[in-house]
Amino acid sequence: MAAETFRLQKVLETFRSSLSENKEVYVKYYIAGWQELVTFMNSLGSVFSFISKDVVSKIQIIENFLSGENGSHYATIQSMVTYELENDLVDLTKRGSHPESGCRTLLRLHRALHWLELFLERLRTSTEDSKTSVMCSDAYNESLAQHHPWLIRKAVGMAFCALPGRDTFFEVMNAGDHTQVVALLGESLPLIAEVYQITEDLYANNNLLELP
Ligand code: 1Q0
């Protein structure tokens, strides 16, 4: 079976589809966007599999909610938050009877989306001699690292050293030559940023940004 190819265009399309007219975020497309990113990570080799496994398990948890009997409440991130909070389905201060709520699981992906936004912005404005490992780790230190313990930070740091160079990155994005990739990144970033900000505000307003 041929491995599925990654396309930057698909990521853009799924994140675009995830925004409803009244600026709610459809969970189905949000996780489809993550699924695309997993395809990308898998094409980078097995050093990254501990990262993609974690993302895949989080996608799975959310998919199970979506296809479960209360699936309709998980249509948007907004409806998920309302539903889980109203029904006491979220461990708010320490892990207890709901260690894998939709809210806490999606929060992990949400934080990672911030990393992605920072990294892609660096990539978009990078020059020929920029190093992907440096761009990745700078973006990581500014975002996700604050939420990870030492051991994970170490492992992530080692994985960054195995990253392919900038040219390969541009190639794997499968979106044409460098100028076209940069243009597409310019188009994708505001969308990713918007989805991120809407989720961030929603979580902040509900005091959910530090869920255990
Ligand atoms: C391209 C190289 C990928 C670089 C990834 C940078 C982020 C690394 C974070 C890795 C942490 C993974 C180990 C598990 C951590 C969990 O403990 C943690 C918390 O969960 P929990 O249940 O224990 O509380 N999980 C997370 O923080 C979620 C981490 C998700 C990382 C998602 C990385 C997404 C990378 C996507 C590849 C995108 C490549 C960019 C180019 C694509 C162009 C659109």
Image (cartoon, rainbow, N blue to C red):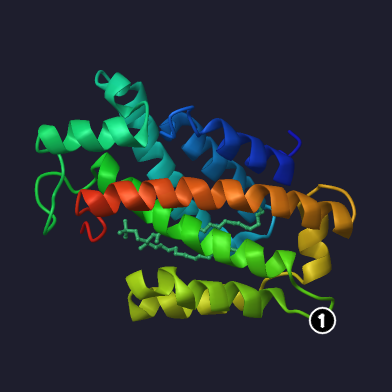
Residue located beneath label 1 in the image: 129
Q: Is residue 181 visible?
A: yes
| The N terminus lies in quadrant | top right
The quarter holding residue 100 reads top left
Residue 88 at x, y = what percent? 9, 38
Whether residue 72 is situated above or below residue 211 in the rendered picture:
above
Residue 137 at x, y = what percent? 56, 77
Q: Nearer the viewer, residue 59 or 12?
A: 12
Report crowding for label 1: few under 14, some 14 to 19, many 20 or more residues within 10 A (C-alpha): few
159 sits to left or right of 45: left
Whether residue 201 is situated above or below residue 79 in the rendered picture:
below
> Which residue appears at 28% of the width and 30% of the height?
79
Q: Is residue 47 visible?
A: no
| The C terminus lies in quadrant | bottom left
Q: Residue furthest right?
A: 177
> Which residue appears at 79% of the width and 57% of the height?
182
The amino acid at mark 1 is Asp
> Which residue appears at 10% of the width and 45% of the height?
97
Secondary structure at numbered mark 1: loop
Residue 105 at x, y = what percent? 32, 48
Residue 196 at x, y = what percent? 46, 51
